[in-house]
Image (cartoon, rainbow, N blue to C red):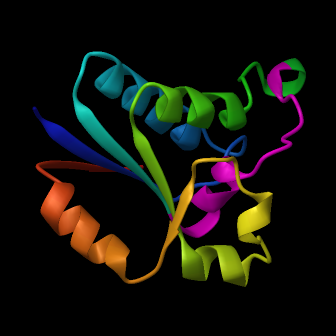
Amino acid sequence: MPRLVLEIAHAPFGHENAYAGLFIAMGWVSVGNEGVVVLRGDGVYAGKKGQQDPFKEINLPPTEKQVRDVLETGGRVVADRRSLQSRGIGEDMLIEGVEVLGEEIRRLIIEQGERVLAL
């Protein structure tokens, strides 16, 4: 089964990168492939729960729904601990199912990343 690691480093709603990355991840895992989404830098904002509905403003759905869809379809979503800490985001502020990892992210990318895509 092909494995993909998809890294999102841009905040949602300022760019389409987070939305596009989660859309790719959803498609990847929905056909039975293994996928891990890594949220780093401002990308950790995509993993926050309780997002406002930006659909009215910029015609994109909240990334909260996309993250939940990836998780419910068998994908994995991890957030970088340092990125969360530097932005004042606690683990309790994340969508249920989003894992928090530190240095282990490097190992995950090397071991799980048959294919790696960074957005």
Q: Along the line of sight, which residue is nearer the eye, 29 or 44? A: 29
Quadrant of the rendered structure where residue 84 is? bottom right
Q: Along the line of sight, which residue is nearer the eye, 32 or 113? A: 32
Quadrant of the rendered structure where residue 57 is? top right
Image coords of residue 103 (percent x, y)? 38, 83
Q: Along the line of sight, which residue is nearer the eye, 80 or 118? A: 80
Image coords of residue 10 (percent x, y)? 57, 55
Query: How many marks are shown on the rendered structure?
Result: 0
Q: Is residue 49 shown in magenta?
A: yes
Quadrant of the rendered structure where residue 43 is? bottom right
Image coords of residue 50 (percent x, y)? 86, 43
The residue sitting at 76% across, 72% down in the picture is 90
The residue sitting at 56% across, 42% down in the picture is 18
Judged left or right of residue 47, residue 77 is: left
The residue sitting at 55% across, 26% down in the picture is 69
- Looking at the image, residue 78 lies above or below residue 73: below
Q: Quadrant of the N terminus?
A: top left
The residue sitting at 23% across, 74% down in the picture is 107
Judged left or right of residue 34, residue 97 is: right
Image coords of residue 115 (percent x, y)? 16, 46
Write the start and end of the magenta stretch as one range: 40-55
- Looking at the image, residue 21 lies above or below residue 77: above
Q: Is residue 18 shown in magenta?
A: no
Judged left or right of residue 38, residue 116 is: left
